[in-house]
Amino acid sequence: MKNRIILAALALSVALLSGCGEQPPPDGASDENRSPRIFPDYADLVIPPNIAPLNFEIKESGDRYHVSIRGESRDDDITVCRAGAKIEIPEKKWKKLLRNNPDKDITIHIHVREQGRWRRYTPLRNRVAAETIDAFLYYRDIVPTNGLWNRMAMHQRDLESFREEKLFDNYRIEHDCMNCHTFNRNNPDEFLFHVRGKHAGTVIFKDGELRKISFPATRVISAGAYCNWHPDGTLVAFAVNSIKQNYYLSGYAGKMKEVFDLESDIVLYDAGRNEVFACPQIASDMRENLPAWSADGRRLFFVSAPPHQPGSPHEITLYSLMQATFDPETRQTGEPELLLSHEEAGGSISFPTASPDGRFLLFCVADFGYFPVNNKSSDLYLMDLQTGEYSCPDINSDESESYISWSGNSRWFVFSSRRFDGMTSKPFICHVDVQGRLSKPFPVPQKDPEYYAVDHRNFSRPELIRSRVRPRFGDFEKVIFNRPAEAAFREDRSGDAKQSNSF
């Protein structure tokens, strides 16, 4: 008798731990006739077939929660039943569910019990896409305050699970700033980032080797800043900027800090020859900035603003979207052409980012300037490069939307948004189909559903990459402490080093 009681207790414990200790009455639950409130808002989405479980918290009062996640085949249902409102989905079962339902809907059925009575909610529905997303997300972890800018780290997150790895922490390099990490077409074996401070230089990983370079200070405006790899992997377009900052204590409610340039150019860097050269068409008296190559490498997109006028308010600085042809063989740049003016866009344009298939261009539009992350007026825009048509899609919020990174297959992108709290940037995933239709964006899933409600880190410059970055902590540390190899400067004979390009 005693043994039977023990076995029964053990069986009950196993059932409770498995999440299925108590099923809601199939016919006895009252129908709420509305969708349940959950956080994050994981409903009406298009999701990658290789994404980690969309764990969530049910924001309905109760003492027991029953969740059933179903595919169309119904032979791979997932059931979670527990006393708490946090729903953590078993990873193996989730992967099987997505694998068995490509280009199909999955539904989330939620029942909540309170004081012995079950309530049934309208099922939530998501679509599993046929196309995968690049498996890793690389980002800079930085606290959301300027007083602690010297505390930051580089992280990579496996989007197919919840595994995350800190690659490098700047306490190892005497708290120098690390920024503007940039990958060549989602390739983890070709990337670079800048170090500012005592150990300044640009760290480049290419051909299995880490090295640090610097620009010739007497020949260009500054060290390299915002940059983009040419598809051939040998050239990098860099903005060189005389950067200043302005802090708003009062008077301008849209942002706390503005980054602006007194002057800026775009230069090209040859990684094989360690050589910098300037093309006069994109290094003029105008303020050229934020270069981005087209998919075929034969066009360079960038933004441009008129020269700085001393004493003028920075809030009047407006950037237009430009393009210039480029010949990879001769490495000559054509005359810049206006692609979209700030007047037509209704604001200042920044961070153009071309899809790898050459079809689309995403960019930001804000009320002024080119630093959208701190500007709540910043929205994302999408342009069809085949037709030139552009729009402001309904994926935007009332807070800042900024940095954009495409997946290698051009069906997904990740962007930074401050829609949760208005202060910290979090990574959101969005699907775009071949016609340019965008799905509802959703935050990168976290194991703890409350993560975004309680964590106040910035996910700075989220970049999608195909697989994990190979260099480790010690590899970065060693090369950063090395003296940089100064790049040579090659004179361009095609024209004057400075000429005006008005639009």
Image (cartoon, grey):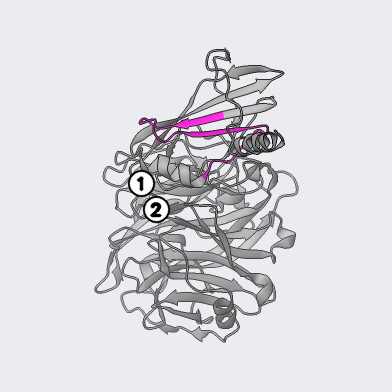
Q: Which residue is mark 1?
A: 411
Q: Are marks 1 and 2 in contact (CB under 8 Å)?
A: yes
Comparing 411 with 234, the one in front is: 411
Up/down of 140 relative to 70, above or below? below
Q: Which residue is mark 2?
A: 407
Up/down of 66 relative to 272, above or below? above
- Is residue 73 inside the magenta stretch? yes
Report the span colored magenta: 67-90
Task: State the image quarter where residue 200 is shown.
Answer: bottom right
Label 1 sits on what residue type? Arg
Identify the residue at the far left of this view: 329
Label 2 sits on what residue type? Ser
Q: Secondary structure at mark 1?
A: loop
Q: Residues within 10 Å of mark 2 (few under 14, many from 20)?
A: many
- Image location (x, y in percent) of residue 487: 46, 83
Q: Secondary structure at mark 2?
A: loop
Q: Indicate left or right for 487 with 426 as reference.
A: left
Q: Residue at x 58, y 50 (%)?
A: 373
- Image location (x, y in percent) of residue 161: 50, 52
Comparing 46 with 72, the one in front is: 72
Q: Residue at x 59, y 47 (%)?
A: 447
Task: State the image quarter where residue 23 is shown.
Answer: top right
